[in-house]
Structures are given as structure tokens and as C-alpha cells.
Image (cartoon, rainbow, N blue to C red):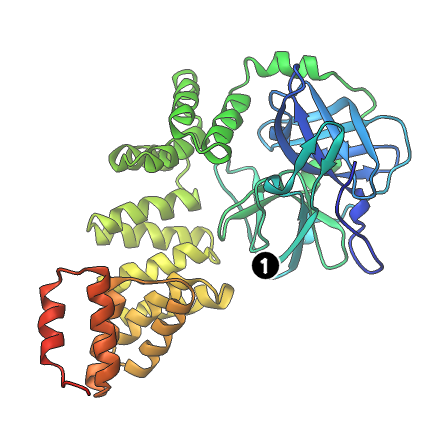
Amino acid sequence: MILSGSASAYEVNKNAVALLIAKDKTGKTVGTGSGFVARPEGILITNYHVLVDAHVIEVHFPNGSHSDVEGIFKVDRARDFAVLKLKEGFYSTLEIGDSSSVKPYDYTSALGYPSAQVMQQKDMVDGQLVQTYGFVLGIHSQAHPKIPFIYTTTPFGPGFSGGPVVNSSNQVVGLATIEGRSINLALPINSVKEFLNQKTTFSFQKLLNEDQASLEAMYYRGNYFLYGLGDANKAVTEFEKILARNPNFTLAHYDLAVAYRDLGMPEKAIDQYEKTLELTPDFPEALSNLGGYYFRSGKLDQSVELFKKAVQVYPNFIQALSNLGAALNKQGQPREAIAHLKKALSLDPEFAIANFNLGNSLFALNLLDEAHKKFELSQKQGIDFLSMHWKLYEIHKKNQRHRDAEKELKTILQIDPFNEEAKKRLSELPIFH
């Protein structure tokens, strides 16, 4: 067995961070995740959803050692954590911190094993332990008002689930749980602490039996179909089964909306986001996503209202700040938009769409040189919108940079070869030899 990873002085004790391989009764791998050892006798913490449908969990460490899970001390399906007992031994550990002391803008780092980099061959396991870095955006509830999460810019990839999120002293303050741009969520570790002294365990078979009737197990299964396998149809089936039994299961509505979005069914997605917000009015991602649908359908007042509420609930919500800026631009309020867009970019300078939106605000205010810089920056970051090239053309034309204006018109015609307006404008430019 080979596992890549290293630990050195002044770093997180990486030998305490485990790769988890979940297998069914036939020995087939049904998923991978991460976890970490909290007590030297072999108490390991991970996400509950890593265990769903598993008959056994294999545990591999960066130093080449491995273990098996002998029993389960505790699972909390709503908070999505599990405390497991490893086979007898003496294990390297991470220090548990105090998540109640976490504040916005605090440093955070996450450690985990990206699923795409886990390779298995017979008795060989090769996994790359990755460490990522960022800072806290805030602590807010999501679907459950009484279950807060640490929102952080520290990115979690698939496979990080259950891995540690540490502070600047390398103490664990959170459990990596949900990943996505600007919405990387970690469960505060204080939710888990009180269960580290459990004395009795139960078996995977007992968990499997209980999970037959568990809506949470069905939800995480649907999540795996949607985000892990990219099979939106299977996810829809699973989420609809949950809602047939409990129409008030907020997360099933939310992820059903995502599945409908992926299937190109916007009306059904909107309906599910609206139902999500009926149940949980302060769900920040649902507010922003529904606002995005309203924005695209021309319902600007409703979209602005939803984006503003998302930012009120979660002041450092980067996507909602950028979306609010875009909607205010559309409403003809570029000055108000600028403050929100600058805040989004102060939190994430690489957020290309926010740079583009800020360029639109500056263009509307006739601050053409500043707009030009923002458009060029957003281009370097991957934005290639037709509307941006038209604005760059206008900027170059006003500044009598005719060659640059010509270049933008030719780019427009590459994107849209039958654009008659671009052809007309191109014919009106001076001819260069």
C-alpha cells in the first residue's frame, strides 16, 4: 500500500488524517472520504454520509499504515457527523480546538483526499492528501436554523468530506461537509466534542438496518447521484421519494431544484426553490439561486429583493454580492452596485464574473478607463461575453483606438458570425494598411 503525503515541523500532523474507503457487502467501493483521529486509542471523526450503504470502512494513513473500523460510537444524521472506533492500536492525533471562538476573516485550512486522485489495485491504495487554505466568511445556518456551519473560502473538493478544518494553531475547528464556490461549509467541531467519550459501539449492520427507514440516508444517496455521479434523473427519483414521506424536508426541495436545473427544467427548479424558502426563509443559497432565476427572466425587483436578503443573512456571501451588483446594474443603479461588487472582490479577487459586473457599473458611469481594466481582468480570468466585447469596442472607439475597436468587432463576429450590426460597424472603421 502506498499513500502520498508528508508531515514536517510547524505543519498540521498529517499522519492523523485518514483516507476512508467505503465498501459494500461484495467488497465493491461505494465511495471515499476523509477523516481524522481525535484520540490516540483510535477515535476517528468523519461525516455520517461517508458511511451510507457501507458494510465496511477501510482506513489508510499517509505513513503507509492502515486500520479498519471496528464499531460506531455515534452518528448524527442531521448534523452529518460520525464518531468511529478503529481497531486497537496507538494512533497519531490532531488537537481539537474551540469552534465557538471562530470569527469572520480567521485563517482556515482543510485537509482531505480528493476522490479523483484515489487509486485502488488489489491490496494497493494510492491517495494524495491535499491541504487547502482560506479564511472564514461567517457562521450561519443553512437549511436547519439550529445547525450553524462555518462558511469559508477554503476549498473542499469531492473526497474531502469528513476531513479536518483547522485554525492558525492547527487545531481542528470544523469538519469539511459541503463544497462549492464561496459556499464551502464546515460543521463546527463543538457539535462533535461531547461524543468523544462514548463507551459503547454498534455495528455497521445495525446502521444499515436503521438507514433503511432514514430519510437522511435517502437524501445523501440522492446527493451522491446528483453531485458524485452526475445522474440528475436518479437524484430526482430519490428526492421525490423523500418528499412523498415528508413534504417539509427542506434540503430535498433544495437539491431537487438543483437536479431540475441540471435537467434543463427551470420552472420546476423555481418551484422547488420557492418551496425551500417557504420552509426556511433565511436559506442563503436558496435565496441567491432563486434570485438568479428571477434575474434571468426579467423580474428585477424580485431578484434584487432576494439578493439583498441573502446578503443580509450572510454578509460575506460572495456570489450573492456579485449577483446583487449585476441586478442593480440592470435596474440602472450602478453606483449602488459598485459597493457590493467591490466587497465581493475584496473577498475573492479572482471572481471573474464580479470583475465583469464591476466593469459594467463603471461603463455605465462613463468611467471608461477603469471599466476597460476590469473587463480585461475578467477576460484573463475566463469571461468571454458578447456584451463585454461590445463595451470594449465602444471604449476603444471613444478613445479613437481604431485598431483595438476593429479587433473587438472581429471577435464579436467570431462569436456571432451573422451579427449584422458588427459587420456594419466594421465597414465604418478607417482602413488600415
Question: What residue did someone put label 1 on?
Answer: 104
In the image: residue 164, left or right of residue 372 = right
Q: Residue at the far right: name it.
A: 90
145 above or below 311?
above
Residue 198, image x and y in percent? 80, 26
- The answer to whether residue 238 is left or right of residue 25 is left
- Quick check: 325 above or below 127? below
**Amino acid type shown at disc 1:** Pro
State the residue in front, 90 or 185.
90
Residue placed most toward the observer, 409 or 186: 409
Along the line of sight, which residue is nearer the eye, 332 or 7?
Answer: 7
Q: Quadrant of residue 40?
A: top right
Residue 108: % across, % down: 65, 56
Q: Position of residue 325 (x, y in %)?
A: 33, 62
Q: Quadrant of residue 371?
A: bottom left
Q: Seen in the image, is 180 located left or right of residue 60?
A: left
For residue 422, say whether it is visible: yes
Q: Quadrant of the N terminus?
A: top right
How many labels, in total? 1
Single out the residue that lies furthest toward the front: 433
Q: Secondary structure at mark 1?
A: loop
State the residue at coordinates (29%, 71%). 361
Res 411 quadrant in image: bottom left
Residue 67, given in percent of the width and then of the height, sits at: 81, 29
Residue 395 can be seen, yes or no:
no
Q: Is residue 106 above or below residue 161?
A: below
Depicted 404 relative to depicted 147: above or below:
below
Q: Quadrant of the C terminus?
A: bottom left
Q: Residue at x 10, y 77 (%)?
A: 427
Taking depth in this image into account, of 415 and 59 the one nearest to the observer is: 415
Classed neighbour count for the residue bearing mark 1: other residues with Cα under 10 Å, few (<14), some (14–19), many (≥20): some
- Residue beneath the point at 60% across and 27% down: 77
